[in-house]
Amino acid sequence: MDIYPDTFAFVQIHHGDSYATLWGNARADFYTDFGGYPTSYFDGTIRRGGSSSYMVYWNDYLARRAVPTDVTIKLVGDWLGMWTYRVQAAVCLEPEGIGKNLRIYMVHVLDYWPIPPDYSRNGFKQAASTQDIALSPGQCQTIERDFTFDATSWANREDIKIIAWAQEPQDTSPLSNRAEVFQAAIMTWPFVIVDCNGNGVPDDQDISGGTSQDCNGNLVPDECDVADGTSEDCNGDVVPDECQLDGNDCNANGVPDDCEPDCNGNSVPDDCDVAEGTSPDCNGDIVPDECQISGNDCNANLIPDECDSPDCNGNAVPDNCEIAVDPGLDLNFNGVPDSCEVEPRLECGVVAVGDSAVTVTLENSYDSPIVVCSVQYDNNTLPVVSRVSNVTASSFDVRLQNPCGDPVTTDNVSYLVIEEGVSTIDGVEFEAWTYTSTVVDLNLSWVGELRRYHRSHVNPVVLGQVMSENDSDWSVFWCQGATAGDPPSPTLLRIGKHVGSDLDVTRAPETIGVVVIEAGHSTIGGVEFEARVGDATVQGVDNTPPYPYPFDIGFASAPTVAILSQAGMIGADGSWAQAYGPTLATAAALNLSLDEDQLGDTERRHTAERVAYAAFEAPLVYPSVGDGDFDFDGDVDLEDYALWETCLAGPGVPGFGGCEHGDLDGDDDIDLGDFGLFQNVFTGPR
């Protein structure tokens, strides 16, 4: 090897020790008579097993060197960046040669490695994939493979070699038909000697002599890295950008900060301003809001109009700006354009549901009902989500679905239905709306879709539901605030549907229903109620559920209806919230857990998350029939009596629409019998 460095290509593989590799083991198995250490093969035909004298090996080498060959191999290397080179092997058959099929091998070896032992030479490091070729006389074919060197090799670059050989294309090399090696070639470091800047001095001498700088240590002069596009030079100082990143690349994108967009001129790239919270970015376009308010901030609150809330009609003009221009839009002076307010209608309850759709008939008749459902895990041992469809003015369908498509067991589902729009019910502020979701969020990609509130909130509780089954594959509602792990804030709301760790991320557009409630504890229609976002304490079903989720104020008796939505996504895999166990709640707390699909992996553990909830002490229909509150203002006063009088028709005469609130005795007419009961519920204004 030292005497004939240009004609003797030696590859040493290890077998049965700590340096053994899969390729090395396969190479040993290739020779069917391999056995014992050491075993040598010369050109694949002469086998020498066990220790032999130097002269024995010398004679084996000379015997094979005397065999003529008509195959030639030439190797060249091209640097691709960092520790990676592209090696090209030009394999040719001499014009006078005999056509043949060849299998081309290329391997990377490191001389004087491993150490010990002292006699280690050209130790095998890595092999490229082989390629079979057929050559005719005078024909050449070039094969290229990329090699990325490990740290040990790069630290000893002078000992790196690429060895290629052309051998008979056999899967094994038995004694009866040896796989002969026809030619080999060696490429030693440095692989390519170039003069990239054309100054008549090899690049390595330019660098070593200081004529050229090599700030990135790739053995290429900096000016050549820039000129050939290997390195960017955004500021034109002929220093590769990658050499100017220390303390100058806040977003770690490989571009110096002084070359990045900086709309507010604070010497911090815009995306870093946003990521670090130095500047808000309400619309998620990675441009600080302060750069987008010129002519776009009607109320001078430094929030671009298209992001400002509330905007109940979705016309990209904040409600307070519209009302300021035309006060007649808000005749009740509550800060909400009258056109956005709806007659309050709400109901909640519990229904038993399995994997077949159940139709829930509604007590109220709705113009545009928004439906949100939550499952109580009692009987199911597999992950399930609620699927809602066929929402009409008087009913909706709901079923349970396992993300893997496995059968599910019947469990209780709590539901909340409310009229779309902005409403105040017994002093509790609601907004409800739908939109069409085309975005699919998933494992490690939590973005959502930016939406705006339809009224102002101090402590918004955001609940949601995928309200359609346009796609038979599962998806589930989720929401976030400023970051994926944050709950929605009063100024920032991103929502959508997610598919967890499902590898199939294609989904048809779905209708998303959203209900936002101002947090608090009160009564609605005489039923005790609490809406709240709790702390990040609820974990997965493979952890230790149920997780008691304490109410802000305890109930008089345990709630029987609970609507739940996870608030933010701290865990990467994706999850959703549900009630857990046979007991939905106590008077002091909900019993909750989180669940994951089992499509990416089978475990269902999950880091602690926050949950938004609306808990009701009992099923509720609002307004209740025969409550005497015709104008839905939470009291029964003279204004309601005036409306009751218009409905008075006498015994046996059905009332017209809206008069059902005056039928206090439930006999489907409005008569003097109802008048006596009306006196009992009369409260006067409050």
Image (tube, grey):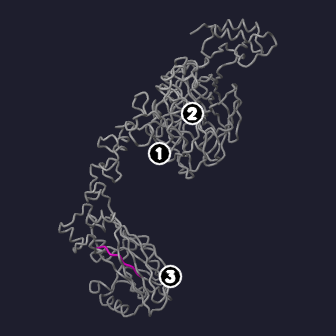
Q: CA distance from mark 1 to mark 2?
A: 23 Å
Q: Position of residue 252 (x, y in %)?
A: 34, 50
Q: CA distance from mark 3 to mark 1?
A: 48 Å
Amino acid on which the number 1 mark rests in the picture:
Ala
Is residue 40 shown to the viewer in this render?
no
Write down the region rendered in magenta.
159-165
Residue receiving disc 2: 514
Contact, mark 3 vs mark 2 (Cβ under 8 Å): no
Residue receiving disc 3: 170
Give SS at disc 2: strand
Q: Position of residue 409 (x, y in %)?
A: 66, 41
Contact, mark 1 vs mark 2 (Cβ under 8 Å): no
Residue receiving disc 1: 572
Sequence-wise first label, 3 or 2: 3
Instruction: Judge depth for marks 3 and 2 and give the one in front.
Output: 2
> 10 Å neighbourhood of mark 1: few (<14), some, or many (≥20)?
some
Give SS at disc 1: loop
